[in-house]
Image: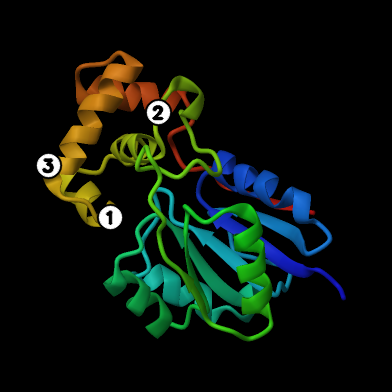
Amino acid sequence: MSPVTVALRDDYDVVVHGLEAMLAPFADRVQVVELNVDTATVTPVDVTLYDTFAQSQADSEDISRIVENPTNGRVVVYSWNAQPELVRQALERGCAGYVDKSTGAEELVAAIERIAAGEVVTLTPRPEPSGETPYGTWPGKEHGLSAREAEILALITQGMTNEGIAARAYLSINTVKSYIRTAYRKIGVTRRSQAVRWGMEHGMLPDHTRELR
């Protein structure tokens, strides 16, 4: 049986490359054919995996546009925001799956196969001791930033307010402020302008590339 063809989508190059590396051991089952960073899919695929790192969530029109493009095949949201309301809206907008980022690589591959075969699959969070997923990678990971801290810092670098970040990331404003404080300590800054400059110098702005495999 031929492997399922997959496109990976996010606005950050390091995120889609990390996801590609995570899937690489299963190349006989899933074949990554495109890495789309703020670009549309040009090669028809069976499944598109939409990573929500610093992206619009499943309640946005962005998801609807991705789903409506037949080149994307069946669309799966890959996120650590797995609130029931978000999952419901994703499925209502036509997504064929919703996978929490605490899902291991082999289980993710199995979900992709089931979705390509016509099923609708949702995989719910499983607690990790740190409260964060150990899978994949993200900008700033090498500097000790957690996935959530990196996402918040990326949105700050994009110029979003704390209120906008809370809405985008589905977090309370106090939780956002807590992540900001811990992120600032790790990167050695005290002011928002310094954080923006650090982010611009360390890959926290969206990329605009497409890679065909």
Q: Camera-side residue: 165 or 157?
A: 165
Could you tell me which secondary element the residue under label 1 belongs to?
helix
Q: Is residue 121 left or right of residue 60?
A: right
Q: Residue furthest top?
A: 188
Which residue bears the numbered disc 1?
Answer: 168
Which residue lies at the image location 43% right of the left edge and 71% below the top edge?
63
Q: Is residue 80 left or right of residue 116?
A: left
Q: Camera-side residue: 192 or 179?
A: 179
The amino acid type found where label 1 is placed reads Arg
Which residue bears the numbered disc 3?
Answer: 174
Where, quadrant-wise, is the N terminus in this rendering? bottom right
Q: Is residue 73 left or right of residue 90?
A: right
Is the residue 114 above or below the residue 153 in the image?
below
Which residue lies at the image location 86% right of the left edge and 73% below the top edge?
2
Q: Position of residue 140 (x, y in %)?
A: 46, 28
Q: Which mark is residue 22?
A: none
The amino acid type found where label 3 is placed reads Asn
> In the rendered structure, which disc, 3 or 1, sits on the residue that comes first in sequence?
1
The amino acid type found where label 2 is placed reads Leu
Q: CA distance from mark 1 to mark 2?
A: 19 Å
Q: CA distance from mark 3 to mark 2?
A: 19 Å
Q: Position of residue 174 (x, y in %)?
A: 12, 42
Is the residue 91 above or below the residue 144 in the image?
below
Which residue lies at the image location 15% right of the left edge and 50% below the top edge?
172
Q: Which mark is residue 145?
A: 2
